[in-house]
């Protein structure tokens, strides 16, 4: 059996007529830049996030940068974040002119540990970027308390966590802003790049809108140095077709996660740690990520047997060569480094079949049995 990491073909087949109609509508209107589809998506995702504003932009990486710049983060400032995340998080901080400062993770949730944050706050600290990794929110209640105590901006990197919640709070409610990615593999994925800033802060929203169009307001008059990062009207049209299905798809992901966990705990509990849903949190399972000390060997074995897996992420940001000048070394963040050596994400998408999951777990069990 072949089990892909992600298969979007069935999803497209089910939405094909609606998607093509939406794309034809854009073509027929000849309204290609910041048109009605973008405005609708911005309004719908702001409402979904329980905030006032959505600002569509070119991709999730730009969304973080735009939010930081709009919040006034720049040269000489420090931004605390997790080292166990995709490069875009740290990259956006540097692009904004600031310095990334890393703090270790909670090994249960894989997210930035709030109790590690205050250890790294200095007089230059201006912001915190918690990353809601794999689809589970960081402890935003505690992070908000710390931010308020020290007068810090909070930008939530929610690229993997649209629809996630902590208690009654959803992504974006407790941060000064949150950012989404619509990369095709995401829970709400476009057919290309796309991103969005969502915020309840009127000033931050207005500055974000200006920054995404070269800092121009009114047109051709530039008061700030922005750049070109607009959500494409065609991508917004696709996302408007998909958005009504998001919660259903997230529910299917949670069902698959429960099934994986039951099978793995039954067959290989001594060798594999399954994901933990922190009490009171609503996980949307962008990824289903296990931990095992024999990660690389297991991945190779699964590949030989037709099972696709991914490692998110094999080298923490503090050890990336591009950040060598920051002066970090191996051992500085042992929990993040351990996760980077042991984390393996299994196939996960709404249309995943039980027989595919059974095959994946059978092969994992076969590997550890030594047969």
Image (cartoon, helix red, strand yellow):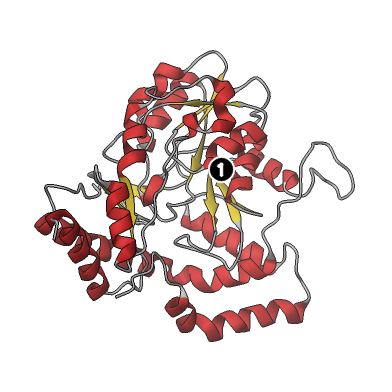
User: Is 153 in front, or is 324?
Assistant: 324
Q: Which quadrant of the figure has residue 146?
A: top left
**Residue placed farthest to the right in the image?**
220
Q: Is residue 177 rendered to the left or right of residue 14? A: right
Residue at left offset 59%, top offset 40%: 201
User: Is 219 in front, or is 193?
Assistant: 193
Q: Is residue 197 rendered to the left or right of residue 36? A: left
Mark 1 = which residue? 88
Residue at left offset 16%, top offset 54%: 368
Q: Which quadrant of the figure has residue 120?
A: top left
User: Is 10 in front, or is 125?
Assistant: 10
| Rendering coords of residue 289 (x, y %) | 31, 51
| Rendering coords of residue 337 (x, y %) | 36, 33
| Rendering coords of residue 17 (x, y %) | 55, 86
| Rendering coords of residue 250 (x, y %) | 36, 63
Q: Is residue 81 visible?
A: yes
In the rendered image, which quarter contains the C terminus?
Answer: bottom left
């Amino acid at each position: 059996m072949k089990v892909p990491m992600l298969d979007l073909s069935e999803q497209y087949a089910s939405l094909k007529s609606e998607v093509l109609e939406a794309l034809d509508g854009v073509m027929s209107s000849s309204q290609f830049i910041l048109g009605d589809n973008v405005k609708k998506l911005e309004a719908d995702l702001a409402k979904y996030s329980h905030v006032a504003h959505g600002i569509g932009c070119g991709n999730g990486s730009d969304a973080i940068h735009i939010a930081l710049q709009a919040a006034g983060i720049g040269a000489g400032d420090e931004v605390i974040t997790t080292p166990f995340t995709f490069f875009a998080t740290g990259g956006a901080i540097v692009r904004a002119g600031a310095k990334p400062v890393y703090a270790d993770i909670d090994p249960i949730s894989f997210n930035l540990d709030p109790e590690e944050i205050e250890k790294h706050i200095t007089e230059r600290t201006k912001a915190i970027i918690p990353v809601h990794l794999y689809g589970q929110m960081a402890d935003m209640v505690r992070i908000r308390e710390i931010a308020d105590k020290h007068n810090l901006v909070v930008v939530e990197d929610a690229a993997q966590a649209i629809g996630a919640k902590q208690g009654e709070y959803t992504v974006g409610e407790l941060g000064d802003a949150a950012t989404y990615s619509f990369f095709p593999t995401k829970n709400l994925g476009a057919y290309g790049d796309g991103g969005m800033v969502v915020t309840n802060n009127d000033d931050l929203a207005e500055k974000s809108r200006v920054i995404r169009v070269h800092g121009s307001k009114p047109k051709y008059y530039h008061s700030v140095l922005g750049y070109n990062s607009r959500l494409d009207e065609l991508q917004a049209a696709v996302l408007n077709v998909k958005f009504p299905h998001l919660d259903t798809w997230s529910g299917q992901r949670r069902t698959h996660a429960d099934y994986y966990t039951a099978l793995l705990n039954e067959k290989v509990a001594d060798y594999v740690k399954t994901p933990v849903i922190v009490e009171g949190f609503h996980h949307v399972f962008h990824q289903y990520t296990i931990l095992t000390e024999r990660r690389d060997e297991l991945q190779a074995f699964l590949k030989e047997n037709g099972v696709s897996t991914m490692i998110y992420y094999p080298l923490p940001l503090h050890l990336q060569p591009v950040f060598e000048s920051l002066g970090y070394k191996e051992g500085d963040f042992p929990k993040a480094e351990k996760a980077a050596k042991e984390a393996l994400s299994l196939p996960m998408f709404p249309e995943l079949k039980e027989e595919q999951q059974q095959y994946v777990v059978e092969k994992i069990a076969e590997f550890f049995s030594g047969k």
